[in-house]
């Protein structure tokens, strides 16, 4: 039985889907720059989640949004002398290429915020009608946080009170203060040609409302799993819950899953300390995408992962070993019966994956199977069974053990 750690309850809960199809929403990339490897930790984890649910026999509908409008995207486009669309179109393509390189399955839907402005207007209208939002003096529409009694339930931290209004997408130092936040941002000259003339006035949507509108459109007002990185918990996912509650009277998702930070050389990744990497940079250095992915999966997603170049090298060697063992098995002519080893490995794999997707332990099961097989001469039937087991593991972890 699959158990998932729900940030909302702070407990591992048995996974019980609401209906026949498991609805999953992931906060996807902001497509105004290259995604960094920390972003990909979340996307890799989510890919494994989807693949594992399918392995367990669930049908899945997966939605990953592309944030193609937000403060930084607009300012970056301005600095580069490009239109917002040119910029986000370029980086969306790059993101899809990166996904393919990492062997991540595409989502069923990749909605873009700029293509959902009518849905965004509609949900803001509902929030206003229900009395949870007001128009500020600057013409923007703000969510009135004090009206929502469960504010902070996902974050599990006490916030300082203090009436403020935040129009920015990123809250930065204001994150610890109880603040109203913008759902619709009135036009400012810095927005250039990025605006919509709507019944809410001339302006553009805030980042947070985009996800409420898109998850509801594609998965309904209540679905199964919402995924993101820990950075998304507050304020972003807290706002999504508050917005959906104000519009539809309920938290949109049963389970809220968050991947922990990726550390690089034991430090938080940041541009200023020089340990900030995009996937592209690592590939340009000659690292194999699957080795990078192997390292990313070497710890449960809820634990911090330390990313080092030695770690990628080591992961690459383990992969090579597995691939050569699989090759050897294809032409096995031994006499030993190894079926039992394969069956036990599969059972163990499922057990650790059922425990909140412990991919770190799952990889150890693969390594143990490789070690056991490397010192035996299995017969033809057993070899087939062991190969099949590796194939099952690979269908879930997506490590291209059988080549491209
Ligand atoms: Zn989001």
Image (cartoon, rainbow, N blue to C red):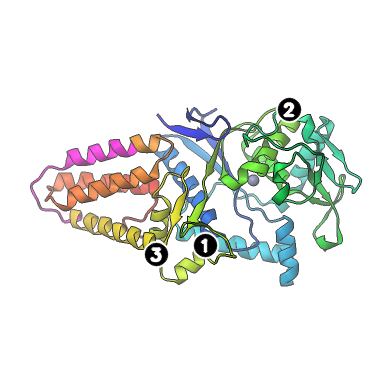
Q: Residue at x 39, y 51 (%)?
A: 398
Q: Please name the residue that numbered disc 2 is placed on.
A: 149
> Which quadrant of the rendered structure holds the N terminus?
top left
Q: Nearer the viewer, mark 3 or mark 1?
A: 3
Whole-percent x, y for residue 69 in the image = 72, 55
Whole-percent x, y for residue 3 in the image = 44, 31
Whichever of callouts 2 and 1 sits on the residue coming sooner in the sequence is 1
Q: Nearer the viewer, mark 3 or mark 2?
A: 2
Please provide the residue range marked out in magenta: 330-350
How many C-alpha atoms fall within 10 Å of the one at disc 2: few (<14), some, or many (≥20)? few
Please give left or right for residue 196 compared with residue 386 in the image.
right
Please give left or right for residue 273 compared with residue 401 in the image.
right
Whichever of callouts 3 and 1 sits on the residue coming sooner in the sequence is 1
Please give left or right for residue 327 compared with residue 280 in the image.
left
Q: Residue at x 72, y 30 (%)?
A: 248
Nearest the eye: 91 or 13: 13
Whichever of callouts 3 and 2 sits on the residue coming sooner in the sequence is 2
- The disc at residue 97 is 1
Residue at mark 2 to residue at mark 1: CA–CA distance:
43 Å
Residue at mark 3 to residue at mark 2: CA–CA distance:
49 Å
Whole-percent x, y for residue 381 in the image = 16, 44
Nearest the eye: 91 or 162: 162
- Which element type, helix, strand or loop, lies under badge 3? loop
Figure check: 266 above or below 391: below
- The disc at residue 288 is 3
Residue 193 visible: no
Q: Quadrant location of residue 343?
A: top left
Nearest the eye: 142 or 151: 151
How many C-alpha atoms fall within 10 Å of the one at disc 3: few (<14), some, or many (≥20)? some
Nearest the eye: 311 or 66: 311
Residue at mark 3 to residue at mark 1: CA–CA distance:
15 Å
Q: Is residue 109 magenta?
A: no
């Amino acid at each position: 039985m699959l158990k998932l750690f729900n940030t909302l309850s702070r407990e591992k809960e048995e996974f019980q889907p609401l209906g026949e199809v498991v609805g999953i929403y992931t906060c996807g990339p902001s497509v105004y720059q290259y995604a960094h490897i920390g972003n990909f930790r979340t996307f890799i984890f989510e890919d494994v989640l989807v693949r594992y649910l399918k392995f367990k026999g669930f049908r899945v509908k997966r939605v990953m949004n592309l944030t193609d409008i937000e403060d930084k995207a607009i300012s970056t486009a301005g600095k580069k002398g490009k239109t917002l669309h040119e910029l986000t179109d370029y980086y969306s393509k790059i993101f899809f290429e990166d996904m393919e390189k990492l062997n991540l399955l595409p989502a069923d839907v990749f909605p873009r915020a700029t293509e959902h402005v009518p849905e965004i207007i509609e949900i803001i209208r509902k929030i206003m009608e229900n009395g949870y939002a007001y128009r500020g003096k600057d013409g923007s529409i703000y969510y009135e946080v004090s009206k929502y009694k469960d504010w902070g339930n996902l974050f599990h931290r006490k916030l300082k009170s203090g009436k403020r209004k935040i129009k920015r997408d990123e809250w930065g130092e204001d994150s610890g203060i109880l603040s109203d936040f913008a759902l619709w941002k009135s036009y400012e000259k810095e927005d250039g040609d990025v605006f919509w003339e709507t019944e809410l006035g001339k302006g553009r949507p805030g980042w947070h409302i985009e996800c409420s509108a898109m998850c509801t459109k594609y998965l309904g007002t209540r679905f199964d799993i919402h995924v993101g990185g820990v950075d998304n918990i507050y304020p972003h996912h807290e706002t999504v819950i508050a917005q959906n509650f104000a519009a539809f009277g309920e938290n949109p998702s049963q389970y809220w899953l968050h991947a922990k930070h990726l550390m690089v050389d034991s430090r938080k990744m940041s541009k200023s300390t020089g340990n900030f990497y995009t996937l592209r940079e690592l590939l340009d250095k000659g690292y194999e995408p699957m080795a990078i992915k192997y390292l990313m999966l070497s710890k449960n997603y809820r634990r911090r992962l330390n990313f080092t170049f030695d770690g990628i090298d080591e992961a690459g060697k383990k992969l090579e070993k597995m691939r050569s063992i699989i090759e050897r098995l294809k032409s096995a002519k031994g006499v030993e019966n190894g079926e039992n080893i394969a069956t036990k490995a599969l059972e163990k794999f499922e057990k650790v994956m059922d425990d909140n997707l412990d991919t770190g332990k799952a990889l150890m099961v693969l390594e143990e199977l490789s070690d056991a097989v490397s010192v035996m001469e299995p017969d033809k039937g057993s070899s087939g069974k062991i190969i099949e087991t590796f194939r099952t593991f690979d269908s879930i972890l997506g490590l291209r053990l059988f080549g491209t």
